[in-house]
């Protein structure tokens, strides 16, 4: 038995071909009983069968081999469940015969409240609290529902049968083919699935309503929600039908199953899960209410649906061979969800918004505690943590970089051939590169290995010297340190206009180009050729790298921004690179502020939204570094957003764009946070109108968050009425998006007494455990309260959220905003005896962020001293 302990993967002397699973969940006692009969192919002489199981009690086990003449049953001499390794070892007294046998196991388990495995979620029906039974198996929790070979490469077919209360609906991956009612119970059997991985198996049992439609080739699509909420599923239904049709074209393979169900689950740890044919969602990611959802909510629903449906091909039909290749699933689905959303809603300009994904990838990957896209996984407990910005956002960004390098058409063709080649099977990162290399004739393997096998990314410095452009790459680190690494960087550049663009691969550390030869123009007044007014690298921000310009080039770009000569994506990129360089202390604080003032006329949603994000971070640093200048800096930002605020106003304009609707809320929130009095007053007026009448036109959903934040900013312990009214709205609303909006506003209050009350509220039964992390958005004043609260409540928090990835959000949200070396010590001391594998990486990253902030504070301080002394 010892030989099976501590192994990252199961031994493969017996492999599953088909599972026949029968489950009987009891929604009152929250237990379930089950049997599984697995067709296993014994491929080598063995005394053992080893498969995964966890939190189950096994009642019986046997393997039988039947041929034409006889049947032989083998009963294990020993059955042992090794909890640590999450495996079930069956030992037999004699060697099992080679060939296909049937492994039968009877077992029992608990419908847990941890939102993984086979779990219970709760809801109210006619004023009565009820349980539903739901599964969430990715990454490695199918083993908590039935014993199985719980690895993505162990694909098999699944035949599922459920014994459930006859008044409830029950769903699984495939359509039901038979339903037998027997009094209070019914037995529902489902059609056998095509071969698939265990992490994609799903079951839901509860009370639901649904809306239904079908694709042009007859796939039945349904959206399920709580009773009475079916209409809120209509938007997602529309997106799903259109997206299925689009992916069929794009992948050149039809949707592989006879039906698609999508269902909103009230308690759900992730955002959504792509179970084959039965996609599960948080309510906020699936339901859209015409009256009370915001434009941002609508966009979220569309992108999440597009993401999960992409997995039906990329992930479910073709599955990663091992978790090391998780990024293939998540990076690709993230990228392609933008393709689908853009095709459905071109006016949302989601490819500009894609830059939000890239910068989150760049920010995380700028840490020394980052990891390569392809990461070694040795234990199931390590998988959760790689569902992070590296796998999703850097993954999606390097795919975008590659697509833009190869061209949309060859990229799509090669992808379709990859899907066809590996359908109903598994693939590794190299398999995708091989397909793209074959389809494009470009050295894709060589190019992409530098991006997926090594962590980090380059900053490319450009300088002009004697009509020459000098390029140099080095690893970018937010800490300002020098790192190792070299990448094959697809460099693009435009000169003075978007008609004059060039590209080359930067393979060496550095490279020099003659401007005149390469670009056909000169940089400063050369009489024989046209002068180009600016040079922008990384055109459209398609590449996953940063650019550092010399002073002359930077000044020209600033001027080009003021003259509105650059695209929104490029304006975004120049700003974000400059911010990152400032934080890494490679550029002064003042020069960043100077650049920011070039954005006074900015009205593009994505650019302004990032400008706002950056302003918040700068205010936070200024509060620590130069508190005496804080008010001045806030005034500067207020001035920066004034133009946009005036153009947008508070009241939506008839027929205005989706992006303006989203922008208004963000701009007003920023003005409120920076202390703009007229905004605070108007917010209060509108909030009170809303309290009097929930349907007042004065507070449409898109500006509610702004008003809530403003109201909380002015609340304090001796004037609680607004604070209490807001909690009242939270309690009365049955729309998750409204609740989330309120949770995200509460902690912005500067009063420590209220902040503490808010944080404690997050631990109460009034907040579902899936939502508590939204309430951690404290302002500068709240940091200390939150840290003390985290320490005081760590045991409870760790017990409640410690078995999933949500725990990491507590750590990063509360630890990262600090900016002193003393705090680093404090944090390290506290966690020294409390760290565990599931938070280890996040904790290191958060501490690194505090160190970076602290160094930045010092440099801003010395810069301001210099200013004073001049
Ligand atoms: N496969 C994931 C769900 C998941 C996440 C399972 C983490 C296990 C751990 C799903 O496809 C997904 O990526 N969901 C995202 C939403 C998406 C639109 C980015 C999520 O849950 O945030
Ligand atoms: Zn995904």
Image (spheres, rainbow, N blue to C red):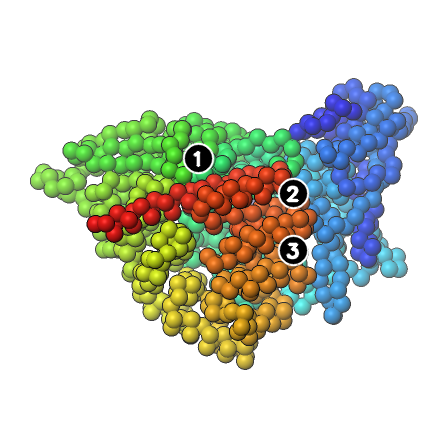
Visible in this render: residue 319? no
Q: Are marks 2 and 1 in contact (CB under 8 Å)?
A: no
**Quadrant where the N terminus is found in the figure:** top right
**Callout 2: 10 Å neighbours few (<14), some, many (20+)?**
many
Q: Secondary structure at mark 1?
A: loop
Picture coordinates of residue 323 (x, y %)? 60, 35
* For residue 168, above or below residue 416: below
What residue sits 46% from the left and 33% below the top? Answer: 455
What residue sits 63% from the left and 49% below the top? Answer: 794
* For residue 639, above or below residue 18: below
Q: What is the spatial separation of the Cα atoms under label 3 and label 1, in whole angstroms? A: 34 Å
- Disc with the residue nearer the chain's start (3 vs 2): 2
**Callout 1: 10 Å neighbours few (<14), some, many (20+)?**
many
- Disc with the residue nearer the chain's start (3 vs 1): 1
User: Label 1, on which residue?
Assistant: 456
Q: Nearer the viewer, residue 845 or 282?
A: 845
User: Label 3, on which residue?
Assistant: 769
Q: Secondary structure at mark 2?
A: loop
The disc label shown at residue 506, or none: none
What residue sits 30% from the left and 31% below the top? Answer: 472
Q: Secondary structure at mark 3?
A: loop
- The extreme left residue here reads 527
Picture coordinates of residue 868 (x, y %)? 25, 52
Left or right of 451 on screen, residue 832: right
* For residue 466, above or below residue 159: above
Picture coordinates of residue 533 (x, y %)? 19, 46
Left or right of 10 on screen, residue 576: left
Q: Nearer the viewer, residue 760 or 27?
A: 760
User: Label 2, on which residue?
Assistant: 138
Picture coordinates of residue 12 (x, y %)? 71, 25
Q: What is the spatial separation of the Cα atoms under label 3 and label 2, in whole angstroms? A: 19 Å
């Amino acid at each position: 038995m010892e030989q099976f302990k501590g192994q990252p993967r199961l031994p493969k002397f017996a492999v599953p071909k088909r599972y026949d699973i029968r489950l009987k969940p009891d929604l009152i006692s929250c237990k379930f009983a089950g049997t599984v009969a697995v067709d296993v192919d014994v491929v080598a002489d063995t005394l053992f069968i080893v498969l995964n199981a966890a939190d189950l009690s096994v009642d019986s086990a046997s393997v039988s081999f039947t041929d034409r003449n006889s049947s032989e049953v083998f009963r294990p001499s020993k059955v042992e469940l090794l909890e640590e390794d999450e495996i079930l070892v069956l030992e037999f007294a004699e060697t099992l015969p080679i060939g296909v046998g049937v492994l039968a196991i009877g077992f029992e388990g608990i419908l847990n409240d941890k939102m993984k495995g086979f779990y219970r979620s709760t809801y109210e029906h006619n004023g009565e609290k009820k349980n539903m039974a739901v599964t969430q198996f990715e990454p490695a929790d199918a083993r908590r529902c039935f014993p199985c070979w719980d690895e993505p490469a162990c694909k098999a077919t699944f035949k599922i049968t459920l014994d459930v209360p006859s008044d409830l609906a029950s769903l699984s991956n495939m359509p039901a083919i038979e339903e037998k009612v027997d009094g209070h119970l019914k037995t529902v059997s489902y059609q056998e699935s095509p071969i698939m991985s265990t992490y994609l198996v799903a079951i839901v049992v509860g009370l639901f309503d649904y809306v239904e439609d079908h694709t042009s080739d007859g796939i039945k699509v349904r959206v399920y929600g709580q009773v009475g909420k079916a209409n809120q599923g209509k938007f997602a239904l529309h997106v799903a039908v259109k997206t299925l049709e689009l992916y069929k074209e794009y992948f050149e393979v039809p949707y592989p199953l006879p039906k698609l169900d999508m269902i909103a689950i009230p308690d759900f740890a992730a955002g959504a899960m792509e179970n084959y044919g039965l996609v599960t969602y948080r309510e906020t990611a699936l339901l859209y209410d015409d009256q009370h959802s915001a434009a941002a909510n609508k966009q979220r629903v569309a992108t999440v649906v597009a993401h999960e449906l992409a997995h039906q091909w990329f992930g479910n039909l073709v599955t990663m061979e091992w978790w090391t290749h998780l990024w293939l699933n998540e990076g690709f689905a993230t990228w392609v969800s933008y393709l689908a959303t853009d095709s459905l809603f071109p006016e949302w300009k989601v490819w500009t918004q894609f830059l939000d994904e890239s910068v989150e990838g760049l920010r995380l990957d700028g840490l020394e505690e980052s990891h390569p896209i392809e990461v070694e996984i040795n234990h199931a407990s390590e998988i959760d943590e790689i569902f992070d910005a590296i796998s999703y956002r850097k993954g999606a960004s390097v795919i975008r970089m590659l697509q833009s390098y190869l061209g949309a058409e060859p990229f799509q063709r090669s992808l379709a051939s990859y899907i066809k080649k590996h359908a109903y099977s598994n693939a590794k990162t190299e398999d995708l590169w091989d397909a793209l290399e074959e389809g494009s004739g470009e050295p894709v393997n060589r190019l992409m290995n530098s991006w997926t096998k090594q962590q980090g990314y380059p900053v490319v410095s450009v300088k002009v010297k004697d009509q020459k452009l000098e390029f140099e790459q080095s690893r970018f680190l937010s800490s300002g340190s020098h790192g190792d690494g070299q990448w094959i960087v697809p460099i693009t550049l435009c000169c003075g206009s978007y008609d004059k663009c060039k590209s080359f691969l930067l393979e060496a550390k550095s490279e020099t180009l003659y401007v005149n030869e390469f670009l056909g123009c000169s940089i400063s007044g050369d009489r024989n050729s046209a002068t180009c007014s600016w040079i922008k690298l990384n055109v459209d921000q398609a590449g996953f790298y940063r650019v550092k310009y010399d002073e002359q080039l930077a000044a020209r770009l600033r001027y080009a921004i003021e003259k509105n000569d650059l695209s929104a994506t490029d304006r975004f990129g120049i700003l974000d690179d400059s911010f990152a360089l400032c934080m890494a202390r490679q550029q002064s604080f003042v020069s960043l502020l100077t650049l920011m003032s070039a954005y006074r006329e900015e009205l593009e949603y994505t650019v302004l939204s990032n400008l706002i994000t950056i302003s918040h971070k700068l205010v936070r640093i200024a509060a620590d570094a130069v508190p005496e200048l804080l008010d001045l800096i806030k005034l500067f930002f207020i001035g920066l957003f004034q133009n946009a605020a005036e153009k947008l106003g508070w009241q939506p304009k008839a027929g205005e764009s989706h992006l303006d609707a989203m922008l208004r809320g963000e701009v007003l929130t920023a003005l409120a946070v920076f202390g703009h009095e007229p905004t605070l007053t108007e917010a209060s007026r509108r909030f009170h109108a809303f309290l009097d009448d929930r349907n007042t036109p004065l507070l449409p959903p898109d500006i509610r968050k702004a008003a809530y934040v403003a109201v909380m900013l002015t609340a304090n312990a001796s004037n609680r009425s607004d604070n209490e009214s807001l909690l009242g709205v939270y309690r009365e609303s049955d729309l998750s998006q409204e609740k989330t909006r309120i949770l995200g506003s509460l902690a912005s209050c500067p009063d420590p007494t209220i902040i503490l009350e808010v944080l404690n509220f997050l631990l109460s039964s009034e907040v579902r455990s899936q939502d508590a992390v939204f309430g951690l958005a404290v302002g500068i004043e709240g940091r200390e309260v939150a840290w003390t609260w985290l320490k005081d409540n760590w045991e409870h928090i760790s017990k409640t959220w410690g078995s999933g990835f949500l725990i990491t959000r507590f750590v990063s949200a509360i630890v990262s905003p600090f900016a002193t070396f003393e705090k680093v010590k404090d944090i390290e001391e506290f966690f020294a005896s409390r760290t565990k594998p599931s938070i280890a990486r996040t904790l290191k990253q958060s501490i690194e962020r505090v160190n970076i902030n602290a160094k930045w504070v010092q440099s801003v301080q010395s810069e301001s001293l210099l200013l004073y002394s001049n």
